[in-house]
Image (cartoon, rainbow, N blue to C red):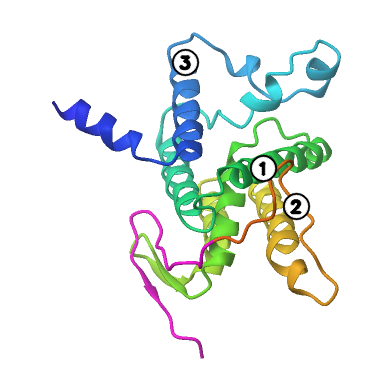
Amino acid sequence: MAWRGLAAEFLQVPAVTRTYTAACVLTTAAVQLELLSPFQLYFNPHLVFRKFQVWRLITNFLFFGPLGFSFFFNMLFVFHYCRMLEEGSFRGRTADFVFMFLFGGVLMTLLGLLGSLFFLGQALTAMLVYVWSRRSPLVRVNFFGLLTFQAPFLPWALMGFSLLLGNSILVDLLGIAVGHIYYFLEDVFPKQPGGKRLLLTPGIPEQQGPTQQSQGSPGTAAEPVAPS
């Protein structure tokens, strides 16, 4: 049956991508069915630290709003870029990939306190897209048939698209900022004179990831660009 084929295909997706995507979809479905309320999910420091509702530290990254265009748009990018990172530069390094999620989540939560942000899933999406784009600088992205540009411009194109939809770009900027911090500490600083890796996964010896491969974006075409 068709659903068995879809289930088998989904099980072929790497573990972190599969788990996070499924958690986002199930959380949204629970809200849509009124089994949960967004008021039970959003990040609230008072409820977390005074009422010990610690689940909010996680659930605020799982809810992308009610079913609709914005939800499916975000899920498309979450699934695609999370998978490309996990199958690309993080292939065979699942613990490092989880650590990137933890690093990004903690930093976004701390910075989100300054902007009174309640849901940070979109920021995490922006971070994933940013890290992938910086690690794939020679890839050309066809943005839904409208624009063609090199991968490092993709996070900014997404932010502009979010602005056109009437959304606040503060969350996107937060994700881009955290993504840049991670990229700098992981990919740039260790290559500087006297630099070294600072983001070592606890209990995991330093590993060398595989060479980056040219990868495209969802619903788009991507082609390698020769360096000038």
In the rendered image, residue 142, in percent from the top left (x then y), is placed at 38, 67
Q: Residue furthest bottom?
A: 228
Q: Is residue 148 magenta?
A: no
Q: Which residues are drawn in magenta?
A: 210-228
Q: Which residue is mark 3?
A: 30
Depth check, front residue: 128 or 44: 128
**Toward the viewer: 157 or 211?**
211
Residue 167 in sight: no
Residue closest to the eye, 228 or 202: 202
How many marks on residues?
3
213 magenta-colored:
yes
Indicate the position of residue 126 as horizontal and vertical percent values: 59, 50
Element at badge 1? helix
Q: Which mark is residue 199?
A: 2
Label 2–label 1 contact, CB within 8 A: yes
Callout 1 environment at 10 Å: few (<14), some (14 to 19), or many (20+)?
some
**Residue 64: percent from left, percent from top:** 53, 32
Residue positioned 70% across, 60% down in the render: 186
Helix, strand or loop at label 2? It is loop
Helix or strand or loop: what does disc 3 sit on?
helix
Q: What residue type is disc 1 on?
A: Phe
Which one is in front in this view, the residue at disc 2 or the one at disc 3?
Answer: 2
